[in-house]
Image (cartoon, grey):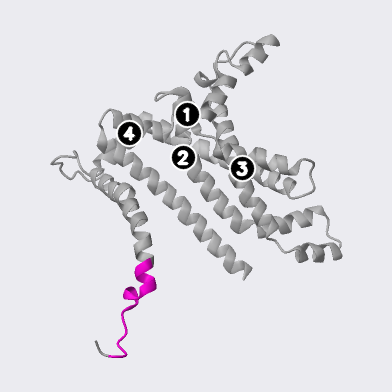
Amino acid sequence: MEAGMKFPAFLKKDTVLALLFLAPSVGGFALFYAIPFVMGLVYSFMDGTMDGKFVGLANYQELLARGSFLNAAWNTALFTSVSVPLMIAISLGLALLLNGNVFFRQWLRTAYILPLVVPVASIVLIWQIGFDWNGAVNGWLDRFGIQRIDWMKSEWAIVVITAIYIWKNIGYNMILFLAGVQAIPESYYEIARLEGAGPFTKLRITLVYLIPTMFFVVLMSIMNSFKVFREAYLLAGGYPHDSIYMLQHYMNNMFLSLDIQKLTAAASLMVGCIMIIALGLFRMERGFRRFME
């Protein structure tokens, strides 16, 4: 080998070692996520999985004409648009509260973080104890002479699922907001105090410098809102009350009936919507960064 010969960048030792460490993760992601998704996207344009023919957008047109799919899409969109802002507001308020000198501050932080490590099945069991027909909440209502409510088979089901979603995820968002608040330089607040700024001006400073964190929290909250199917399924089964019949319920039922074309078409539409939301948030974040610079 001639002296002074240089290897291409991808053959350098550090690059090769990095690729070797990444290979198991990349291979697993490709095998269990990327390749199945691409195959599902292809199946959504065909009339069968075995020797199927290309039918264009026929599966999507039939899907959009189904009332069950439209109901599931509407419920998912409504749940996300209501629960995400509600959780953002509560978690941000708790982060600002716990950033100060609050009594039992360490205990409260632990209490809000605890649901993160609790398995979903345990969470469902806890809420069944509370909201079952013979649960604690109905017991209290009955004690005060109020008629019992079948929570998971009435319009209250969406309220229960929203409460579970907030209770399960609020600790994660609170940690992110708390880290963002503590990363804001104290000098900004000192300058504001010297200029006679009040509490609302200080809050505005906090919110402005929390916007990058806010984008990430909103994105993660939206992603987590699509995972609420686990709790809804364990609490109410595959065909719950109409108010909590989500897109994942629809796709799960299509899988059980082996209607792969409708399943893959619904999954592709959901992924497309998530990507549009994510790209929109990233675009807004880049615009904010340019504005701050």
Q: Which residue bears the numbered disc 1?
A: 232
Q: Is residue 241 above or below residue 163?
A: above
For marks 2 and 1, the one nearer the N-term is 2
Quick check: 61 left or right of 132?
Answer: left
Is 251 a magenta residue?
A: no
Residue 167 visible to an observer of this rendering: yes
Closer mark to the observer between disc 1 and disc 4: 1
Region rendered in magenta: 3-17
Instruction: Describe the element under mark 2 as helix, strand or loop.
Output: loop
Q: Mark 2: few, some, or many residues within 10 Å (few <14, many ≥20)? A: some
In the image, residue 86 lies at what x, y percent? 62, 40
Q: Residue at x 70, y 61 (%)?
A: 184
* Disc 1 to disc 3, C-alpha distance: 20 Å
Q: Which residue bears the numbered disc 3?
A: 171
Give the residue type at disc 3: Gly
Give the residue type at disc 2: Phe
Give the residue type at disc 1: Ala
Closer mark to the observer between disc 3 and disc 2: 3
Q: Which residue bears the numbered disc 2?
A: 226
Viewer-nearest residue: 3 or 189: 3
For marks 3 and 2, the one nearer the N-term is 3
Q: Which residue bears the numbered disc 4?
A: 65
Quick check: 263 left or right of 131?
Answer: left
* Disc 1 to disc 4, C-alpha distance: 25 Å
